[in-house]
Image (cartoon, helix red, strand yellow):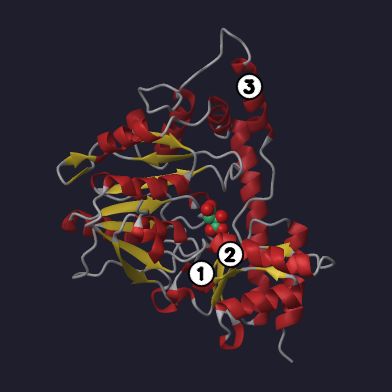
């Protein structure tokens, strides 16, 4: 038996489990400590009432012979029309017209980000920002692909732009970005799209945080640029808007116009999904569709406001401390410089042991993340306020 040798190129454990393990070990050793966790970007507000009611209704339908449903519709690769109609309408509001056949409902953005790798040969080169959401990097390493990095730093506003002369076949972009919170303007994204169409690269665009965009000039979808349907796949999720981190539902757009290596990627993805995936449950999809109802949209708007208030609270705290940061305005993440040249993991440990606040060490997202930490705005108001007070106490100079 020979296992996939590429696994030996991965770090021993995934960043998020490493953080969870260290946190749990500290809590075990200090059972009296009241830890506040603002590390992993998990939501804290419950599902909206309209989503819950729709899911209850769907469960009742499943209980009756006349309305019971088995596998989802094959025509749309298991996506139910009610959800696909709602997604088409969402894109139409952004000025983007999509066919139902171009939208693939999935169990979340992370799975699709990893699974899309199946479509491409190991010979391709993946261009990945650094720092980056570790799933993109790990998926490409597992596939045996060479990875090159586009460095994101304070100098380029944490928004790397295309570089002529660097060969890249698969380009991963995430905007608003995880972890840095920086977001591309439509004009900047247009440069990436033009680059991909010129060079034949494919953009894998993760829009999981698009709902957090407040500034008008920033992109909500890669398809808001000219020519994106010829070079980009977009991945999105209900996790951070409708609170689906535990329910699991997302969607991926693979335009019919997208051709690479002589193949229509829409057909290839359908082929891949038909073999390895059996769709998202009817109950979940019904809940996701309800997130687009009038009441559902109101619930989402309330949740976004709540998390933005956290982001504002943290931003104010960092400003008072005079610590440079990015994100928070158009993103639920704040990317913060560690004080006094401290390393990311040293700062993580100091915050954990001295303030009992758990943050994300920036170096876990890549080499260029060293000397930074990430803090999430997905916590509860009270916890976020208290975390800010503890952080101020710990880091205030003089
Ligand atoms: C994060 O902390 O980066 C998020 O939880 C990412 C994810 O949604 O997997």
Helix, strand or loop for disc 1: helix
Expressed as whole percent of the image width and height from the top left, the position of residue 24 reads: 70, 63
Picture residue at 68% right of the left edge, 50% below the top: 44
Query: Which residue was labeled with disc 1?
Result: 364
Answer with the quarter of the image where residue 236 lies.
top left
Marks 2,3: beta carbons within 8 A: no
The residue under label 2 is 18
State ligand 1's quadrant. Answer: bottom right
Which residue sits at x=63%, y=69%?
A: 315
Q: Going from the N terminus, do you reach mark 2 or mark 3 first?
A: 2
- Could you tell me if residue 185 is visible in this image? no
Q: In the orientation shown, which residue stands out farthest toward the top? A: 66
Tell me if 398 is positioned left or right of 220 in this view. Answer: right
Give the answer, above or below, for where 299 lies relative to 306. Answer: above
Q: Residues within 10 Å of mark 2 (few under 14, many from 20)?
A: few
**Residue 61 in the image, given as x and y percentages of width and height:** 61, 16
User: Which numbered disc, 1 or 3, marks the residue that appears first in the sequence?
Assistant: 3
Say whether mark 3 is within 8 Å of ligand 1: no
Question: Helix, strand or loop at disc 3?
Answer: helix
Answer with mark 1 or mark 2, whichever residue precedes in sequence: 2
Give the labeled residue for mark 3. Answer: 59
The number of numbered discs placed on residues in the rendered structure image is: 3
Q: Do residues under tags 1 and 2 come within 8 Å of each other at their CB atoms?
A: yes
1 or 2: mark nearer the eye: 2
Query: Residue 186 got which mark?
Result: none
Q: Which type of secondary structure does the marked residue at label 2 adopt?
A: helix
Looking at the image, can residue 284 be seen? Answer: yes
Residue positioned 76% across, 65% down in the render: 28
């Amino acid at each position: 038996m020979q296992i996939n040798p590429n696994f030996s190129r991965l770090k021993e454990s995934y960043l998020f489990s490493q953080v969870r393990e260290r946190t749990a070990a500290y809590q075990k050793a200090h059972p009296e400590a009241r830890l506040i966790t603002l590390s992993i970007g998990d939501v804290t507000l419950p599902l909206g009432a309209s989503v819950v009611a729709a899911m209850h209704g769907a469960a009742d339908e499943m209980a009756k012979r006349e309305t019971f449903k088995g596998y989802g519709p094959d025509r749309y690769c298991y996506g139910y029309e009610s959800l696909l109609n709602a997604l088409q309408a969402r894109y139409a509001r952004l000025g983007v017209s999509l066919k139902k056949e171009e939208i693939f409902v999935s169990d979340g953005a992370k799975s699709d980000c990893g699974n899309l790798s199946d479509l491409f040969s190991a010979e391709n080169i993946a261009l990945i920002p650094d720092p980056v959401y570790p799933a993109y990097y790990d998926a490409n390493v597992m596939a045996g692909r060479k990875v090159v990095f586009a460095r994101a730093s304070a100098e380029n506003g944490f928004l790397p732009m295309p570089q002529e002369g660097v060969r890249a076949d698969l380009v991963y972009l995430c905007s608003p970005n995880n972890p840095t919170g920086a977001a591309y303007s439509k004009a900047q994204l247009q440069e990436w799209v033009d680059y991909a169409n010129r060079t034949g690269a494919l953009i894998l665009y993760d829009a999981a945080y698009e709902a957090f965009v407040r500034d008008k000039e920033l992109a909500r979808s890669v398809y808001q640029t000219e020519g994106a349907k010829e070079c980009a796949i977009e991945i999105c999720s209900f996790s951070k808007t409708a609170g689906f981190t535990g329910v699991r539902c997302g969607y991926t757009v693979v335009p019919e116009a997208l051709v690479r290596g002589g193949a229509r990627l829409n057909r290839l993805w359908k082929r891949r999904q038909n073999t390895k995936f059996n769709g998202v449950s009817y109950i979940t999809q019904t809940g996701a569709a309800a997130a687009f109802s009038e009441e559902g949209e109101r619930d989402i708007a309330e949740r976004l406001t709540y998390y933005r208030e956290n982001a504002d609270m943290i931003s104010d705290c960092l400003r008072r401390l005079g610590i440079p940061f990015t994100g928070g305005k158009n993103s639920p993440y704040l990317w913060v410089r560690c004080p006094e040249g401290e390393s990311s993991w040293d700062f993580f440990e100091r915050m954990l042991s001295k303030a009992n606040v758990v943050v994300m060490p920036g170096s876990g997202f890549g080499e260029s993340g060293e000397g930074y930490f990430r803090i999430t705005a997905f916590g509860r108001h009270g916890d976020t306020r208290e975390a800010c007070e503890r952080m101020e106490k710990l880091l205030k100079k003089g």
